[in-house]
Image (spheres, rainbow, N blue to C red):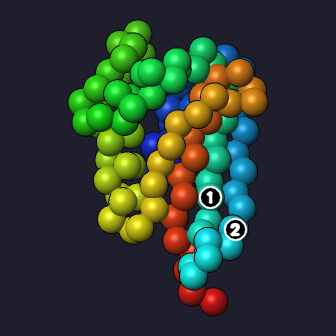
Amino acid sequence: MAGNLLDNACKWAKSGVKVSVRREDGGRRPFVTLVIDDDGAGLPPEDREAALARGSRLDESKPGSGLGLSIVVELARIYGGGLTLEASELGGLSARLRLPAAGD
């Protein structure tokens, strides 16, 4: 999952990608949140959900199958987590992968 998100960020970034990870208290269960930001063109809010759909390619100027993000979404769901896309503080896109933390 992280590899796919990093590949996408590097593919679309102008010059920089920022990665951060933090553990969060999720009530009954702690979560780990991986955030990958890039400084590319980003995606308008109305296109973000479509970008997560299987086979969706909103911009075909770069190589890809349109399957990567949908696979990340499905795997995250299987593990009890999720993936969201937001505007990045770097100016591009921020992918936020949230997964249950391993037991202590």
Residue sitting at x 37%, y 49%: 73
Report whether residue 43 is seen: yes
Determine the residue located farthest toward the top in the rendered image.
Answer: 61
Determine the residue located farthest toward the bottom in the rendered image.
Answer: 104
Residue 23's disc is 2
Residue 61: percent from left, percent from top: 41, 10
Is 94 drawn above or below residue 15 in the view shown? below
Amino acid type at mark 1: Thr
Residue sitting at x 75%, y 26%: 90
Residue sitting at x 72%, y 51%: 20
Query: Residue 27, located in which quarter of the rendered image?
Result: bottom right
Determine crowd level at label 1: few under 14, some 14-19, many 20+ residues with C-alpha closer than 10 A. many
Determine crowd level at label 2: few under 14, some 14-19, many 20+ residues with C-alpha closer than 10 A. some
Is 98 drawn above or below residue 62 in the view shown? below
Residue 33's disc is 1
Looking at the rendered structure, the number of numbered marks drawn on it comes to 2
Front residue (pair 65, 42): 42
Q: Regarding mark 1 in the picture, which secondary structure is present there?
A: strand
Report whether residue 38 is seen: no
Q: Regarding mark 2 in the picture, which secondary structure is present there?
A: strand
Mark closest to the chain's N terminus, 1 or 2: 2
Left or right: 68 as drawn, with respect to 87: left
Amino acid type at mark 2: Arg
Front residue (pair 28, 51): 28
Determine the residue located farthest toward the left in the rendered image.
Answer: 55
Residue 92: percent from left, percent from top: 64, 23
Residue 44's disc is none
Residue sitting at x 32%, y 42%: 70
For the C terminus, give its image quadrant. Answer: bottom right
Left or right: 82 as drawn, with respect to 21: left
Disc 1 vs disc 2: Cβ atoms closer than 8 Å?
A: yes
Q: CA distance from mark 1 to mark 2?
A: 6 Å
